[in-house]
Image (cartoon, rainbow, N blue to C red):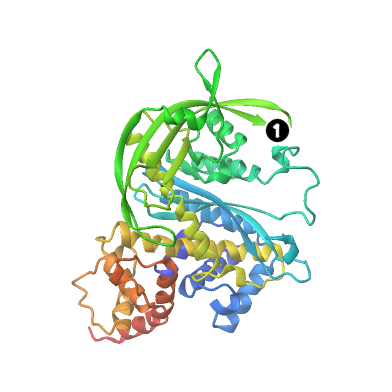
Amino acid sequence: MDPKRWSEEEFGEVDLHDARLDRRLLLIAQRVAESSGGTVASVFRDAAERQGAYDFLANDRVAWASIASASYAATVARCAGEEFVFVPEDGSSLSITDGARAKGTGPVGARKLGARGFQVMNSIAVSAAGVPLGVVGQAWWTRAETPAVKSAKARTTDEKETRYWGSEMSAVRERFRDHGGGTIPWFQLDRGGDAWPVLLEAAKEGQWVTIRSAYDRRVVEGPGGGRTYLHKTMEAAPILGGYRLPVRGGHGRAERNAHMVVRATKVTLQMQDEASSQAHLASVWCVWTVEVETTPAGERPLNWMLLTTRPVRHFTDAKLTIYGYSQRWRVEEFHKAWKTGACNVEDLQLRSERATRGWATVLAADAMRMLRMTYLAREEPSRPATDEFTRDEIHAVYLAMSKSWDEKRIPTIGKLVAWIADIGGHSGKASGAHAGVIVLARGWDRVAPLVPVVTRLLKLKPV
């Protein structure tokens, strides 16, 4: 959480071809970490620093791609030593105020509402333990002012937004290949990624990917070439095992321990390019986990049918595939932290596309910093807090809680993050709910101003 240390780790490898610009970026990132916010004005309290940030973002020599590359490289470096990391990938839209249409934006949402902004395909890295590690890729684009004339079936892959699923996977794969030290990225995609170009390229490149099935695709059976369909094939697939899944109650869902049955088999899918009428074959594994005998009346059973290029030969392989796909939700949490509550990226009011992307890239890295802290407290709560916090920051948390700290007794990261969440107004402890990134960000915003105060007081403390 140390803003200066994080800034240097996240953007220290940036090369903007001017040491002064490099240093300015590190200061900007540090200030963002000290006080997350969607606008430059909300982050910078000092007038000179605020103007310096505006000048930096308006500078034609500052390439947002260079800022992004430094952040991606830092995330890949955090993955070192892991056999693999999960890479949830998903698209989102950013609504940006652009009344004059001078920022390079395009339509977002329903065209009749007139909203403007950008489309972004985001890829993040998550450790095998479920801890977010950072952003590893973002592809930006704008939609055309008028809808496509051709039907979806008549358009080629290059004419559809589907292409961004595959192109972003390819870009991230190259980053790991060049700088990942042998760590394998295992992509996790929802139904939107169930497209023949994505599956075909992943199978051809030997890329690990898991995609939630959206279609009952044709399946080629054996050397004889007989055809059936995916759902029918999986109903006849062998049962590898079962497990109990605790389900929390919510809107339209009853609390229960769901009994899940797992089937898996290898299939060869026949996928049709409707634009060219050309058929493509891809051999993948299919893992089907479905709720049996515990579904309450009026509810649909829990049901995931997953296509994966990683071999599934045993029940443990199937369980790891299911667990990996469950980590896809981390990218949804990133979108929430980036866009609302913690970083409020959609509040920015910069004047150019270049400035908007550069500022949004720094906020994206900060959103992942907060998300990482949230999950470290959940997945590795017994680690000493000094692994992630400076002693001055720990003192500041104790001060905010009206407690005194004996430095010989280092609190755990789980305990310290819980206190920060309490300061932020976390009210879910009684129900056992974990603190989310927004309440953690709110708590840290209240602690951060105390850190320099503690630093000065400790310097005055008699030895």
Which of the two residues, 29 or 275, is positioned nearer the viewer here? 275
Which of the two residues, 50 or 417, is positioned nearer the viewer here? 417
Q: Name the residue under label 1.
A: 274
Q: Position of residue 275 (x, y in %)?
A: 73, 33
User: Looking at the rendering, in which quadrant would you find the C terminus?
Assistant: bottom left
Residue 299 relative to residue 202: left or right: left
Q: Which residue is drawn at 35% across and 78% down?
A: 423
**Kind of residue at badge 1:** Glu
Tally the numbered discs. Answer: 1
> From the viewer's perspective, is residue 111 above or below residue 41?
above
Q: Position of residue 35 (x, y in %)?
A: 48, 75
Q: Position of residue 449 (x, y in %)?
A: 42, 82
Q: Which residue is drawn at 33% across and 30% down?
A: 314
Task: Please identify the residue farthest to the top as the structure is shown.
Answer: 224
Q: Where is residue 310 in the image (x, y as percent from the top left)?
A: 43, 33
User: Looking at the rendering, in which quadrant would you find the N terminus?
Assistant: bottom left
Which of the two residues, 149 or 258, is positioned nearer the viewer here? 258
Q: Quadrant of residue 454?
A: bottom left
Q: Residue at x 67, y 71 (%)?
A: 350
- Asked whether the viewer can see residue 424, the reply is yes
> From the viewer's perspective, is residue 371 above or below residue 54?
above
Under circle 1, the secondary element is: loop
Label 1 neighbourhood size at 10 Å, few (<14), some (14-19), many (20+)?
A: some
> From the viewer's perspective, is residue 238 above or below residue 453?
above
- Asked whether the viewer can see residue 15, the reply is no
Q: Quadrant of residue 182?
A: top left
Which of the two residues, 314 or 258, is positioned nearer the viewer here? 258
Residue 43 relative to residue 143: left or right: left
